[in-house]
């Protein structure tokens, strides 16, 4: 049986437009979640202070800002993120940006996750960008790049962990957004999967936002999701 505690592997995507709304949700979920994703919307509204408030609650922070810029900018920005006590940070899977982020987090416990292919992209989106590879092949190649330059893991959909594991092995962290409980809509995710499917495929952390945020009873929803996740982790070979 798995020794993984599912509650620690659920990352709640706190995608709300204000600090006040974030605090209201966190008040309701205090004691039921331990890991929070702060993305572009909330970070734009509330900035680093929101990170301090989440850390002050005893929760971990996944800062999903998808850095991509010249090396000096990425290096310095990553150093600032590390100093704020963030646990996970996303960087687009560009060799120069990833290398700069690895340099910027030196001496800290910050884990760097390369963004492979956004979960709302499909093969047609890649062709529109001039990329002729399949989504799965591109994700696997970018995961290998991230591993080679010293990143800790990747962000990828629930359809790709098996291909990633073939390239980078079992210890590389896979964080999967676009996870939807069975019977829920996929929203704007082109490659959505259920918690059970995602964990069985090999993902380590699941990012779930709207199904919890928009639920009539967010606590009950979290409880149901964590229960499903725990069963899936327990059923997965160690």
Image: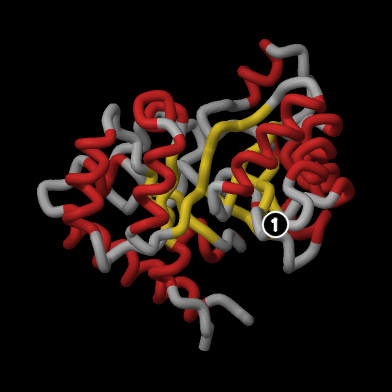
Residue closer to the observer: 162 or 46: 46
Q: Residue furthest left?
A: 216
Answer left or right for 202 relative to 152: left
As helix, strand or loop, the secondary structure at mark 1 comes to: loop
Residue matched to label 1: 108
Placement of 169 over or under 49, stated as above or below: below
Residue 102 image offset from top left, x and y in percent: 79, 45
Q: How many numbered marks appear?
A: 1
Residue 79 image offset from top left, x and y in percent: 69, 41
Residue 10: name its quadrant: bottom left
Residue closer to the observer: 26 or 223: 26
Quarter of the image that includes the C terminus: bottom right
Can residue 140 be seen at all in this image of the molecule? no
Please report the residue visible at 21 percent of the width from the left and 37 percent of the height from the top: 21
Please report the residue visible at 47 percent of the width from the left and 64 percent of the height from the top: 9
Answer left or right for 224 relative to 148: left
Can residue 128 be seen at all in this image of the molecule? yes
Placement of 33 over or under 21, stated as above or below: below
Q: Residue furthest right?
A: 148
Residue 234 image offset from top left, x and y in percent: 48, 80
């Amino acid at each position: 049986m798995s020794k993984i505690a599912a509650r620690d592997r659920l990352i709640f995507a706190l995608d709300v437009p204000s600090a006040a709304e974030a605090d209201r949700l966190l008040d309701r979920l205090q004691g039921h979640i331990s890991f929070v994703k702060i993305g572009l919307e909330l970070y734009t509204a509330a900035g680093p202070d929101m990170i301090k408030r989440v850390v002050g609650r005893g929760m971990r922070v996944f800062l999903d800002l998808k850095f991509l810029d010249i090396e000096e900018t990425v290096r310095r920005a990553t150093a600032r993120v590390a100093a704020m006590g963030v646990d996970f940070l996303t960087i687009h899977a560009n060799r120069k940006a990833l290398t700069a982020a690895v340099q910027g987090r030196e001496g800290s416990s910050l884990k760097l996750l390369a963004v492979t292919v956004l979960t709302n992209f499909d093969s047609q989106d890649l062709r529109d960008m001039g990329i002729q590879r399949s989504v799965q092949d591109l994700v696997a190649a970018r995961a290998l790049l991230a591993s080679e330059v010293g990143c800790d893991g990747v962000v990828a959909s629930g359809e790709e962990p098996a291909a990633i594991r073939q390239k980078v092995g079992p210890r590389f962290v896979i964080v999967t957004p676009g996870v939807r409980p069975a019977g829920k809509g996929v929203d704007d995710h082109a490659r959505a999967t259920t918690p059970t499917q995602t964990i069985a495929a090999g993902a380590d952390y699941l990012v779930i936002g709207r199904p919890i945020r928009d639920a009539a009873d967010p606590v009950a929803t979290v409880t149901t999701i964590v229960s499903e996740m725990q069963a899936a982790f327990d059923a997965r070979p160690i």
